[in-house]
Amino acid sequence: MWLIELAVLVLLGTSGRAIGEAAEHSRWVRTVVRLLVAALTLFSVVLAVVATTVGEPSLAIRALGAGIGVGLAWLGGYRRVLARWVPIDPGSILDTMGLAALQGAIGFFGGALLVAETLPPFEVTAEQLAGQAVAEVFLAFIWIGFPTRRGWRQALERLGLRGTDRRVVAVSVVFTLALFAVSVVTSLLASLLQPGVIERIEERLLPLTTAFASPVAALALGLLAGTGEEILFRGAIQPRYGLLLTTLLYTVLHVQYELSLVSLGVFGLAILLGLERRWFGTTACILTHALYDALAILLQGTLR
């Protein structure tokens, strides 16, 4: 089932990019896209009303959040204001579609974060992680216009993927320590102020920490998660849509941490990774992410 979900996600991303490029040159396609977006936004609002009526507030919040996120992106005034802080072209149909997808996901998963205490244990296999990483890397390259707008070298440069040397390794170690500092502080505060949330999170993540408890498995998890997520979020999305929106998306997608101080810690980690991307490139972020995840899994297994 997970393989089908990833395939659908890749297909949607590829189709969206192709439609966006076609809309740049065809008024008819632009009109169809706008009609579809209007219909989707209206459907989200209606779904939210119906869900509220039948006693499904979690669905209502997610539907309304997605609808607001998508609808806002199509307001020219909103895009022009946003363009003062992020390097989007407010008149670009491609940037508008990307912004709609980004904000729609933030709205939907932000709503899911509010009711995340009902989530089941978080089980994932190495095959799933590998498939997810491949899908994320593929989407990142498609997102930036490879191969239709950019060649291989241009794509690597746009994604911030560079060679590794001692400086990059040293930077990654320093940022890994900074990530642990943020994680430790927010986790301690959550343990004191939200002990019930911490218990649910630990129970939810137990299958994951158990399955990847060995050093080799933990390093594999770190490399897969770090490569896929950093190339997509910090490599592809952040340079176009800015640090804050990218960080918000990254945080709400980690619904397993609920709306808690731990989520605030994830937000802090994403900010640090975003700054690392800005100053030192995506390769450094990948190394930092991989080191952090691997060490965190091993420490969880040791302390359990």
Image (tube, helix red, strand yellow):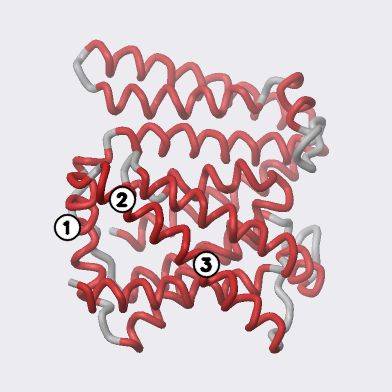
Of label 1 and label 3, which has the lower sequence position? Answer: 1
Q: Give the residue at x 18% y 71%.
A: 304
Q: Give the residue at x 45% y 26%.
A: 65
Picture quarter containing residue 2? bottom left
Three-letter amino acid code of the residue under disc 3: Gly
Q: Mark 2, residues whose alpha carbon is within 10 Å: few (<14), some, or many (≥20)? A: many
Q: Considering the image in quadrants, where does the N terminus appear?
A: bottom left
Q: Is residue 240 left or right of residue 55?
A: right
Q: Secondary structure at mark 3?
A: helix
Q: Give the residue at x 39% y 26%.
A: 63
User: Mark 3 = which residue?
Assistant: 228
Picture quarter containing residue 117? top left
Q: Is residue 88 left or right of residue 65?
A: right
Of label 2 and label 3, which has the lower sequence position? Answer: 3
2 vs 3, front mark: 2
Q: Secondary structure at mark 2?
A: helix
Give residue 40's position: percent from left, percent from top.
Answer: 50, 24
